[in-house]
């Protein structure tokens, strides 16, 4: 028997051994990659302590609350309301304010005109040292463009924003024109606008569903006609962040003269991706973002100004640009828009929702009381707010004791606090929210 050759291992054993070797190789590779990425992980953990790069270019914040935001059902604003909000937008530090659609009605024309006259020159609280540029929207039609200029010309800095759809579905079914006619009409509109106004922006409506090569051709022609800003709207909120980044980058690289103008984003929120798309557009090369306060706008709304700006503010290492917005004015501006439009902000809305800086879980409350950064990635004061510890059934003794001190109960014996805390917990089990009146000794 000793002279017999050793038997080959069973096939199942051979397979298991092969799987084990493969698994070990994969594990080793993961460990190597993990070691390589640890520097990045350490950077993330300490990122909040770093300072902003003052050498970054400034991202142009183009606010369209008074135009696209007003197109939200039920959000129509009168002249006085537009003036009030435009004043606050200037104080917030918005670079460009799209005040309306002058051809839409006599009332909107007057509103844009008065905003240009009265708000256009304001310099209060503006880090740029320049007044807010007042913009009006117009279709690619001469009478629209002329009416727009008549309204915005009164501002020291003003802009005509004209647009035409570029997707085949719009060209065929809505406009009933060919691609060639689309280019001709766009060039004609931009040329006419430039004959009156130095600052002209062109938007390709439904760019998210348009042929990129066709848009590059069209954009090259409107650049020759004198356009200064080209906007690439995801009009129906269709694209994903990676697609939008690649689209902006493709257009910037493949449009003749594309490096001589400002590229802009305008993203809708139909799939909940408006802010993500906007930020990816910036990573792709956009240097203007079109946004609204509270994200209001057509259908599911637009990219939210406060979310985009605070992403730049909170994660400066990630983005190649900075904003001159005074973030401490964000909450005030948000609440003014809510008051004027009657459109409430959901409690869990990022940055400006009632719960954005509220803590009820006992573990979170204890952490925040010891060091705010344990559960807050930005200071509430940075957006004009303060943290709130919500007392409820999930609250712990630390938050309860803190509330007692806020109510003037200091120097209490631990046993007294223990008994009071038990009463509080019994009450909290029966109520959704516990008021200060229920915090009794």
Image: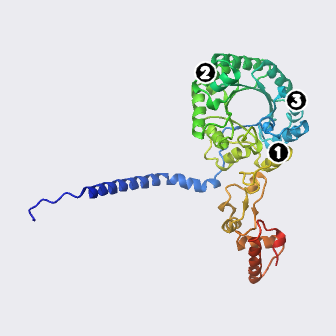
Residue drawn where x is 67% and y is 16% of the image: 181
Residue 201 or residue 342, whichever sits in front:
342
The residue carrying pointer 2 sits among few (fewer than 14), some (14 to 19) or many (20 or more) residues within 10 Å by Cα, namely some
Residue nearest the observer in this picture, 406 or 189:
189
Q: Residue furthest right?
A: 80
State how many labels appear. 3
Say which quadrant the C terminus sits in: bottom right
Q: Earlier in the sequence, mark 1 or mark 3?
A: 3
Dividing the picture into quarters, in which one does residue 396 lie?
bottom right
Query: Which residue corresponds to mark 1?
Result: 337
Real-space CA distance between mark 3 and mark 2, rounded to the nearest whole angstrom: 35 Å
* Mark 3 / mark 2, whichever is N-terminal: 3
* SS assignment at label 2: helix
Q: What label does residue 380 carry, if any? A: none
The residue pinned by badge 3 equals: 113
Task: Classify mark 3: helix, strand or loop.
Answer: helix
Image: 425 above or below 28: below
Q: Quadrant of the N terminus?
A: bottom left
Q: Is residue 182 left or right of residue 160?
A: left
**Which residue ends up furthest to the front in the rendered image?**
173
Given this view, does label 1 or label 3 mark the residue nearer the observer?
Answer: 1
Question: What is the secondary structure assignment of the residue under circle 1?
Answer: helix
Q: CA distance from mark 2 to mark 1?
A: 39 Å
User: Marks 1 and 3, Cα distance to the nearest angstrom?
Assistant: 20 Å
300, above or below 383, in the image: above
Instruction: Determine the residue positioned at 72% across, 41% down.
Output: 300
State the residue position of label 2.
Answer: 217
Q: Are marks 3 and 2 in contact (CB under 8 Å)?
A: no
* Position in image of residue 389 (x %, y %): 75, 64
Residue drawn at x 76%, y 79% is 417
């Amino acid at each position: 028997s000793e002279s017999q050759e050793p038997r080959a291992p069973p096939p199942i054993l051979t397979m298991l051994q092969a799987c084990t070797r493969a698994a070990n190789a994969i594990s080793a590779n993961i460990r190597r990659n993990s070691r390589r990425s640890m520097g990045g992980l350490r950077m993330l953990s300490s990122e909040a302590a770093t300072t902003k790069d003052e050498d970054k270019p400034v991202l142009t914040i183009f606010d369209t609350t008074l135009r696209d935001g007003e197109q939200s059902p039920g959000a129509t604003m009168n002249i006085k309301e537009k003036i009030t909000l435009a004043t606050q937008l200037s104080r917030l530090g918005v670079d460009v304010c799209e005040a309306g659609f002058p051809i839409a009605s006599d009332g909107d024309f007057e509103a844009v005109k008065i905003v240009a006259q009265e708000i256009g020159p304001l310099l209060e609280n503006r880090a740029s040292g320049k007044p807010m540029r007042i913009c009006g929207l117009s279709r690619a039609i001469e009478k629209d463009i002329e009416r727009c200029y008549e309204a915005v010309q009164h501002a020291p800095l003003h802009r005509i924003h004209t647009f035409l759809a570029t997707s085949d579905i719009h060209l065929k079914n809505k406009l009933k024109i060919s691609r060639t006619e689309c280019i001709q009409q766009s060039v004609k509109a931009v040329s006419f606008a430039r004959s009156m106004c130095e600052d002209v922006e062109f938007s390709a409506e439904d760019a998210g569903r348009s042929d990129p090569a066709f848009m590059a051709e069209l954009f090259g022609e409107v650049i020759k006609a004198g356009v200064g800003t080209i906007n690439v709207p995801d009009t129906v909120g269709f694209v994903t962040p990676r697609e939008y980044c690649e689209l902006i980058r493709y257009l910037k690289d493949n449009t003749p003269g594309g490096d001589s103008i400002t590229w802009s984003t305008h993203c809708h929120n139909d799939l909940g991706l408006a802010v993500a798309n906007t930020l990816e557009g910036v990573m792709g090369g956009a240097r203007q973002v079109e946004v609204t306060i509270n994200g209001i706008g057509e259908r599911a709304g637009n990219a939210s100004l406060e979310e985009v700006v605070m992403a730049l503010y909170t994660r400066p290492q990630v983005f190649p640009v900075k904003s001159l917005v005074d973030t401490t004015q964000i909450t005030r501006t948000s609440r003014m828009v809510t008051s004027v439009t009657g459109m409430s902000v959901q409690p869990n809305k990022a940055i400006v929702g009632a719960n954005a800086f509220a803590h009820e879980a006992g573990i979170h409350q204890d952490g925040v009381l010891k060091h705010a950064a344990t559960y807050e990635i930005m200071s509430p004061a940075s957006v004009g707010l303060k943290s709130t510890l919500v007392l409820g059934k999930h609250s712990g003794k630390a938050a309860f004791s803190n509330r007692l001190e806020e109510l003037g109960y200091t120097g209490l014996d631990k046993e007294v606090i223990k008994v009071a805390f038990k009463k509080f917990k019994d009450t909290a089990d029966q109520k959704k929210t516990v008021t200060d009146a229920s915090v009794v000794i």
